[in-house]
Image: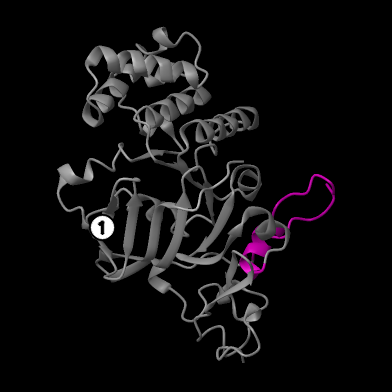
Amino acid sequence: MSQATQEPLISVENLSIRFRTGEGLVTAVDNVSFDIAAGEVLGLVGESGSGKSVTAKSLMLLNAENAVYGENSRITINTGEESIEVLQLKRPQDRKQIRGGLISMIFQEPMASFAPAMSVGSQMVEQLQIHTSMTKAEAKEHSIDMLDRVGISDASKRFKQYAFEFSGGMRQRAMIAMALSTKPRLLIADEPTTALDVTIQAQVIDLMLDLVEEFKMGILFITHDLGVIAQTADRVAVMYLGTLLETGPVRPVIRTPSHPYTQGLINALPRLDDLDAPLTPIPGDIPSPLERPAGCVFHTRCAQALADHCNTVVPSVTEVEPGHKVACVLRQPASSGNTP
Protein backbone atom coordinates (compact mmCIF):
# COMPACT_ATOMS: atom_id res chain seq x y z
CA MET A 1 0.00 0.00 0.00
CA SER A 2 1.02 3.57 -0.57
CA GLN A 3 2.79 5.80 1.91
CA ALA A 4 1.00 9.02 2.72
CA THR A 5 2.74 12.40 2.93
CA GLN A 6 2.13 14.95 5.68
CA GLU A 7 0.43 17.62 3.57
CA PRO A 8 -3.28 16.90 3.07
CA LEU A 9 -4.36 16.80 -0.54
CA ILE A 10 -7.95 17.41 0.51
CA SER A 11 -9.34 18.44 3.87
CA VAL A 12 -13.00 17.98 4.80
CA GLU A 13 -14.03 19.86 7.95
CA ASN A 14 -17.37 19.77 9.77
CA LEU A 15 -19.20 18.64 6.64
CA SER A 16 -22.95 18.62 7.15
CA ILE A 17 -25.40 18.09 4.30
CA ARG A 18 -29.16 18.31 4.45
CA PHE A 19 -31.68 17.98 1.65
CA ARG A 20 -34.81 20.06 1.20
CA THR A 21 -37.75 17.69 0.82
CA GLY A 22 -41.50 17.77 1.14
CA GLU A 23 -40.97 16.42 4.65
CA GLY A 24 -38.62 19.30 5.54
CA LEU A 25 -34.84 19.33 5.83
CA VAL A 26 -33.40 15.81 6.00
CA THR A 27 -29.88 15.27 7.38
CA ALA A 28 -27.73 13.01 5.19
CA VAL A 29 -24.25 13.86 6.54
CA ASP A 30 -23.57 15.23 10.02
CA ASN A 31 -20.35 16.99 11.05
CA VAL A 32 -17.91 14.77 9.13
CA SER A 33 -14.18 15.59 9.03
CA PHE A 34 -11.28 13.77 7.35
CA ASP A 35 -8.11 14.39 5.34
CA ILE A 36 -6.58 12.51 2.42
CA ALA A 37 -2.90 12.94 1.57
CA ALA A 38 -1.30 12.55 -1.84
CA GLY A 39 -0.49 8.89 -2.37
CA GLU A 40 -2.91 7.75 0.33
CA VAL A 41 -5.98 5.51 0.12
CA LEU A 42 -8.79 6.28 2.57
CA GLY A 43 -11.47 3.62 2.79
CA LEU A 44 -14.99 4.85 3.59
CA VAL A 45 -17.14 1.94 4.75
CA GLY A 46 -20.67 1.44 5.99
CA GLU A 47 -24.00 -0.10 5.05
CA SER A 48 -26.13 1.20 2.19
CA GLY A 49 -27.80 4.40 3.32
CA SER A 50 -24.88 5.49 5.51
CA GLY A 51 -24.18 8.63 3.49
CA LYS A 52 -20.97 7.49 1.81
CA SER A 53 -21.90 8.50 -1.74
CA VAL A 54 -23.43 11.81 -0.65
CA THR A 55 -20.16 12.61 1.12
CA ALA A 56 -18.12 11.68 -1.95
CA LYS A 57 -20.28 13.66 -4.36
CA SER A 58 -19.90 16.74 -2.19
CA LEU A 59 -16.18 16.81 -3.01
CA MET A 60 -17.11 17.52 -6.65
CA LEU A 61 -20.33 19.43 -5.87
CA LEU A 62 -22.37 16.72 -7.60
CA ASN A 63 -25.20 16.46 -5.10
CA ALA A 64 -28.68 17.50 -6.20
CA GLU A 65 -29.68 21.14 -6.19
CA ASN A 66 -31.80 20.65 -3.08
CA ALA A 67 -28.63 19.94 -1.03
CA VAL A 68 -27.89 22.43 1.75
CA TYR A 69 -24.36 22.54 3.15
CA GLY A 70 -23.77 23.56 6.75
CA GLU A 71 -22.43 27.06 7.30
CA ASN A 72 -19.33 25.68 9.09
CA SER A 73 -18.63 23.07 6.41
CA ARG A 74 -15.37 23.35 4.49
CA ILE A 75 -13.79 21.29 1.71
CA THR A 76 -10.28 22.43 0.81
CA ILE A 77 -8.15 21.08 -2.04
CA ASN A 78 -4.42 21.81 -1.82
CA THR A 79 -2.84 21.68 -5.28
CA GLY A 80 0.64 22.61 -4.09
CA GLU A 81 0.26 25.99 -5.75
CA GLU A 82 -3.04 27.12 -4.26
CA SER A 83 -5.83 26.14 -1.88
CA ILE A 84 -9.29 25.84 -3.40
CA GLU A 85 -12.38 26.18 -1.22
CA VAL A 86 -14.74 23.81 -3.03
CA LEU A 87 -17.97 25.01 -1.42
CA GLN A 88 -17.20 28.56 -2.59
CA LEU A 89 -17.20 27.53 -6.26
CA LYS A 90 -20.56 28.88 -7.38
CA ARG A 91 -20.20 29.24 -11.16
CA PRO A 92 -20.16 26.23 -13.55
CA GLN A 93 -16.89 27.39 -15.13
CA ASP A 94 -15.25 27.50 -11.69
CA ARG A 95 -16.48 24.02 -10.81
CA LYS A 96 -15.04 22.61 -14.03
CA GLN A 97 -11.54 22.62 -12.52
CA ILE A 98 -12.56 20.02 -9.92
CA ARG A 99 -15.02 17.95 -11.96
CA GLY A 100 -12.85 15.63 -13.98
CA GLY A 101 -9.84 17.89 -13.58
CA LEU A 102 -8.44 17.85 -10.04
CA ILE A 103 -10.90 15.14 -9.01
CA SER A 104 -12.22 12.18 -11.01
CA MET A 105 -14.80 9.58 -10.01
CA ILE A 106 -15.41 5.98 -10.99
CA PHE A 107 -18.69 4.28 -10.24
CA GLN A 108 -20.01 0.85 -9.36
CA GLU A 109 -21.75 0.39 -12.71
CA PRO A 110 -19.67 1.72 -15.61
CA MET A 111 -22.54 1.43 -18.12
CA ALA A 112 -24.14 4.34 -16.25
CA SER A 113 -21.03 6.43 -16.93
CA PHE A 114 -20.67 5.90 -20.68
CA ALA A 115 -23.08 7.39 -23.20
CA PRO A 116 -24.40 4.42 -25.19
CA ALA A 117 -24.49 6.28 -28.52
CA MET A 118 -20.87 7.46 -28.40
CA SER A 119 -17.76 5.34 -28.72
CA VAL A 120 -15.62 4.99 -25.61
CA GLY A 121 -12.77 6.78 -27.37
CA SER A 122 -14.95 9.74 -28.38
CA GLN A 123 -15.96 10.26 -24.77
CA MET A 124 -12.38 10.08 -23.57
CA VAL A 125 -11.24 12.60 -26.18
CA GLU A 126 -14.11 14.96 -25.37
CA GLN A 127 -13.20 14.93 -21.67
CA LEU A 128 -9.54 15.65 -22.39
CA GLN A 129 -10.38 18.55 -24.67
CA ILE A 130 -12.55 20.04 -21.92
CA HIS A 131 -9.97 19.73 -19.14
CA THR A 132 -6.64 20.03 -20.98
CA SER A 133 -5.10 21.98 -23.85
CA MET A 134 -4.58 18.82 -25.93
CA THR A 135 -5.50 18.78 -29.60
CA LYS A 136 -7.91 16.13 -30.78
CA ALA A 137 -5.03 14.06 -32.18
CA GLU A 138 -3.07 14.33 -28.92
CA ALA A 139 -6.14 13.43 -26.90
CA LYS A 140 -6.72 10.34 -29.05
CA GLU A 141 -3.13 9.19 -28.66
CA HIS A 142 -3.24 9.74 -24.91
CA SER A 143 -6.58 7.92 -24.57
CA ILE A 144 -5.32 4.86 -26.46
CA ASP A 145 -2.20 4.86 -24.28
CA MET A 146 -4.34 4.96 -21.12
CA LEU A 147 -6.55 2.10 -22.34
CA ASP A 148 -3.40 0.10 -22.98
CA ARG A 149 -1.96 0.92 -19.55
CA VAL A 150 -5.04 -0.35 -17.72
CA GLY A 151 -4.66 -3.70 -19.45
CA ILE A 152 -7.11 -3.46 -22.35
CA SER A 153 -5.64 -5.40 -25.26
CA ASP A 154 -5.73 -3.99 -28.80
CA ALA A 155 -6.47 -0.57 -27.37
CA SER A 156 -6.56 1.23 -30.72
CA LYS A 157 -9.41 -1.06 -31.83
CA ARG A 158 -11.25 -0.82 -28.51
CA PHE A 159 -10.97 2.97 -28.67
CA LYS A 160 -13.48 2.94 -31.54
CA GLN A 161 -15.96 0.58 -29.88
CA TYR A 162 -19.00 1.27 -27.70
CA ALA A 163 -19.37 0.42 -24.01
CA PHE A 164 -21.90 -2.36 -24.71
CA GLU A 165 -19.23 -4.16 -26.75
CA PHE A 166 -17.00 -4.44 -23.66
CA SER A 167 -17.20 -7.09 -20.95
CA GLY A 168 -17.95 -5.96 -17.39
CA GLY A 169 -14.32 -6.04 -16.31
CA MET A 170 -13.21 -4.28 -19.49
CA ARG A 171 -15.81 -1.53 -19.00
CA GLN A 172 -14.53 -0.98 -15.48
CA ARG A 173 -10.96 -0.73 -16.76
CA ALA A 174 -12.06 1.69 -19.48
CA MET A 175 -13.81 3.85 -16.89
CA ILE A 176 -10.64 3.88 -14.77
CA ALA A 177 -8.62 4.84 -17.86
CA MET A 178 -11.05 7.66 -18.57
CA ALA A 179 -10.99 8.87 -14.96
CA LEU A 180 -7.19 8.87 -14.87
CA SER A 181 -6.59 10.35 -18.30
CA THR A 182 -6.72 13.91 -16.93
CA LYS A 183 -4.22 12.94 -14.20
CA PRO A 184 -6.45 13.98 -11.29
CA ARG A 185 -5.03 14.71 -7.88
CA LEU A 186 -7.84 12.73 -6.21
CA LEU A 187 -9.74 9.67 -7.43
CA ILE A 188 -13.11 8.84 -5.88
CA ALA A 189 -13.89 5.15 -6.33
CA ASP A 190 -17.54 4.51 -5.40
CA GLU A 191 -18.05 0.74 -5.01
CA PRO A 192 -15.88 0.16 -8.11
CA THR A 193 -15.54 -3.62 -7.73
CA THR A 194 -18.93 -4.72 -6.35
CA ALA A 195 -20.35 -5.78 -9.74
CA LEU A 196 -17.23 -7.73 -10.74
CA ASP A 197 -16.32 -11.35 -10.15
CA VAL A 198 -13.55 -11.95 -7.60
CA THR A 199 -10.72 -12.47 -10.09
CA ILE A 200 -11.48 -9.29 -12.03
CA GLN A 201 -12.04 -7.51 -8.70
CA ALA A 202 -8.51 -8.39 -7.57
CA GLN A 203 -7.05 -7.22 -10.89
CA VAL A 204 -8.87 -3.88 -10.70
CA ILE A 205 -7.71 -3.31 -7.10
CA ASP A 206 -4.10 -4.11 -8.02
CA LEU A 207 -4.36 -1.77 -10.99
CA MET A 208 -5.67 1.09 -8.85
CA LEU A 209 -2.90 0.67 -6.28
CA ASP A 210 -0.26 0.61 -9.02
CA LEU A 211 -1.66 3.83 -10.46
CA VAL A 212 -1.68 5.49 -7.02
CA GLU A 213 2.04 4.81 -6.80
CA GLU A 214 2.65 6.06 -10.34
CA PHE A 215 0.56 9.24 -10.24
CA LYS A 216 0.94 9.97 -6.49
CA MET A 217 -2.76 10.75 -6.24
CA GLY A 218 -5.08 10.18 -3.32
CA ILE A 219 -8.03 7.80 -3.41
CA LEU A 220 -11.31 7.87 -1.53
CA PHE A 221 -12.37 4.22 -1.80
CA ILE A 222 -16.05 3.72 -0.92
CA THR A 223 -17.34 0.24 -0.17
CA HIS A 224 -19.34 -1.85 2.26
CA ASP A 225 -16.72 -4.64 2.00
CA LEU A 226 -14.20 -4.55 4.85
CA GLY A 227 -12.26 -7.37 3.18
CA VAL A 228 -11.53 -5.12 0.20
CA ILE A 229 -10.60 -2.24 2.49
CA ALA A 230 -8.16 -4.44 4.43
CA GLN A 231 -6.26 -5.12 1.20
CA THR A 232 -6.54 -1.64 -0.29
CA ALA A 233 -6.62 1.23 2.19
CA ASP A 234 -4.04 2.95 4.37
CA ARG A 235 -6.71 4.37 6.67
CA VAL A 236 -10.38 3.61 7.15
CA ALA A 237 -13.40 5.70 8.18
CA VAL A 238 -16.53 3.87 9.34
CA MET A 239 -19.75 5.76 8.59
CA TYR A 240 -23.27 5.15 9.88
CA LEU A 241 -26.29 7.32 9.14
CA GLY A 242 -24.09 10.20 7.97
CA THR A 243 -21.80 10.14 11.02
CA LEU A 244 -18.21 8.90 11.33
CA LEU A 245 -18.14 6.44 14.23
CA GLU A 246 -14.55 5.22 13.96
CA THR A 247 -11.45 6.25 12.00
CA GLY A 248 -7.83 5.20 11.98
CA PRO A 249 -5.09 3.15 10.32
CA VAL A 250 -6.69 0.18 8.61
CA ARG A 251 -4.99 -2.63 10.54
CA PRO A 252 -5.70 -1.39 14.10
CA VAL A 253 -9.31 -0.59 13.20
CA ILE A 254 -9.95 -4.03 11.69
CA ARG A 255 -7.92 -6.05 14.20
CA THR A 256 -9.08 -4.21 17.33
CA PRO A 257 -12.29 -2.36 16.42
CA SER A 258 -13.46 -0.03 19.19
CA HIS A 259 -16.97 0.90 18.11
CA PRO A 260 -19.77 -1.68 18.43
CA TYR A 261 -20.82 -0.90 14.83
CA THR A 262 -17.36 -1.67 13.45
CA GLN A 263 -17.31 -4.84 15.55
CA GLY A 264 -20.68 -5.78 14.10
CA LEU A 265 -19.52 -5.26 10.51
CA ILE A 266 -16.49 -7.49 11.11
CA ASN A 267 -18.51 -10.19 12.92
CA ALA A 268 -20.90 -10.32 9.95
CA LEU A 269 -18.08 -11.38 7.59
CA PRO A 270 -17.81 -15.08 6.65
CA ARG A 271 -14.70 -16.78 8.05
CA LEU A 272 -12.70 -19.01 5.73
CA ASP A 273 -10.85 -20.54 8.70
CA ASP A 274 -14.14 -21.64 10.28
CA LEU A 275 -16.73 -22.49 7.64
CA ASP A 276 -19.15 -23.84 10.24
CA ALA A 277 -19.23 -20.61 12.23
CA PRO A 278 -22.65 -18.93 11.98
CA LEU A 279 -22.89 -15.48 10.46
CA THR A 280 -23.71 -12.80 13.00
CA PRO A 281 -25.67 -9.98 11.37
CA ILE A 282 -26.17 -6.62 13.03
CA PRO A 283 -29.76 -6.68 14.35
CA GLY A 284 -32.36 -4.40 12.83
CA ASP A 285 -32.08 -2.04 9.88
CA ILE A 286 -30.45 1.32 9.39
CA PRO A 287 -33.08 3.97 10.20
CA SER A 288 -34.45 6.36 7.61
CA PRO A 289 -32.83 9.81 7.66
CA LEU A 290 -36.37 11.06 8.29
CA GLU A 291 -36.29 9.20 11.61
CA ARG A 292 -32.74 10.01 12.71
CA PRO A 293 -32.26 8.79 16.31
CA ALA A 294 -31.29 11.23 19.05
CA GLY A 295 -28.06 10.72 20.96
CA CYS A 296 -25.75 8.14 19.39
CA VAL A 297 -27.20 7.37 15.97
CA PHE A 298 -26.34 3.67 16.39
CA HIS A 299 -27.99 3.13 19.76
CA THR A 300 -31.20 1.65 18.28
CA ARG A 301 -29.22 -1.37 17.02
CA CYS A 302 -26.45 -1.53 19.62
CA ALA A 303 -26.41 -4.43 22.07
CA GLN A 304 -24.01 -2.47 24.31
CA ALA A 305 -26.10 0.72 24.46
CA LEU A 306 -26.47 2.24 27.93
CA ALA A 307 -30.08 2.88 28.93
CA ASP A 308 -31.07 6.53 29.33
CA HIS A 309 -27.70 7.70 28.07
CA CYS A 310 -26.84 6.56 24.54
CA ASN A 311 -30.32 7.57 23.39
CA THR A 312 -29.83 11.16 24.56
CA VAL A 313 -26.10 12.02 24.59
CA VAL A 314 -24.10 12.51 21.40
CA PRO A 315 -20.74 10.84 22.15
CA SER A 316 -17.58 12.91 21.79
CA VAL A 317 -14.63 11.62 19.76
CA THR A 318 -11.95 9.79 21.77
CA GLU A 319 -8.48 8.83 20.57
CA VAL A 320 -8.00 5.24 21.76
CA GLU A 321 -4.48 5.07 20.30
CA PRO A 322 -2.46 7.41 18.06
CA GLY A 323 -4.56 8.19 14.98
CA HIS A 324 -7.32 5.73 15.98
CA LYS A 325 -10.47 7.63 17.02
CA VAL A 326 -13.92 6.48 18.03
CA ALA A 327 -17.20 8.19 18.88
CA CYS A 328 -18.64 5.97 21.61
CA VAL A 329 -19.36 6.62 25.28
CA LEU A 330 -17.97 3.19 26.16
CA ARG A 331 -14.53 4.31 25.01
CA GLN A 332 -14.47 7.70 26.72
CA PRO A 333 -12.12 8.29 29.66
CA ALA A 334 -13.62 7.91 33.13
CA SER A 335 -13.06 11.63 33.72
CA SER A 336 -15.22 12.59 30.72
CA GLY A 337 -18.31 14.57 31.56
CA ASN A 338 -20.35 12.42 29.18
CA THR A 339 -19.54 9.17 30.97
CA PRO A 340 -22.44 7.98 33.13
Give the residue number, with chain letter if any, for mark 1.
87
What type of secondary structure mainly makes up the magenta span? loop
Residue farthest to the front, as pictured: 81
Residue in view at x 17 percent, y 53 percent: 90
The image quadrant that residue 124 belongs to is top left
- Please state the horizontal and vertical placement of residue 92, each as a whole percent of the image: 16, 45
Q: Is residue 60 above or below residue 24?
A: above
Question: Along the horizontal axis of the image, is 32 left or right of 102?
Answer: right
Residue in view at x 31 percent, y 14 percent: 140
The image quadrant that residue 197 belongs to is top right
- Please state the horizontal and vertical placement of residue 46, each as a whole percent of the image: 54, 57
Number of callouts: 1
Q: Residue 259: say if magenta.
A: yes
Q: Describe the element under mark 1 as helix, strand or loop.
A: helix
Q: Residue 164: say if magenta.
A: no
- Please state the horizontal and vertical placement of residue 112, each as a whole percent of the image: 37, 34
Question: Along the horizontal axis of the image, is 226 left or right of 56?
Answer: right
Q: Is residue 289 above or below residue 199?
A: below
Residue in view at x 31 percent, y 37 percent: 100
- Please state the horizontal and vertical placement of residue 32, each as a whole percent of the image: 43, 65
The image quadrant that residue 174 belongs to is top left
Q: Is residue 152 above or below residue 204?
A: above
Residue in view at x 50 percent, y 54 percent: 48
**Quadrant in the picture for the C terminus:** bottom right
Front residue of this view, candidates 257 and 263: 257
Residue type highlighted by circle 1: Leu
Question: Along the horizontal axis of the image, is 211 left or right of 125?
Answer: right
**Residues shaded magenta:** 258-282
Front residue of this view, candidates 147 and 190: 147
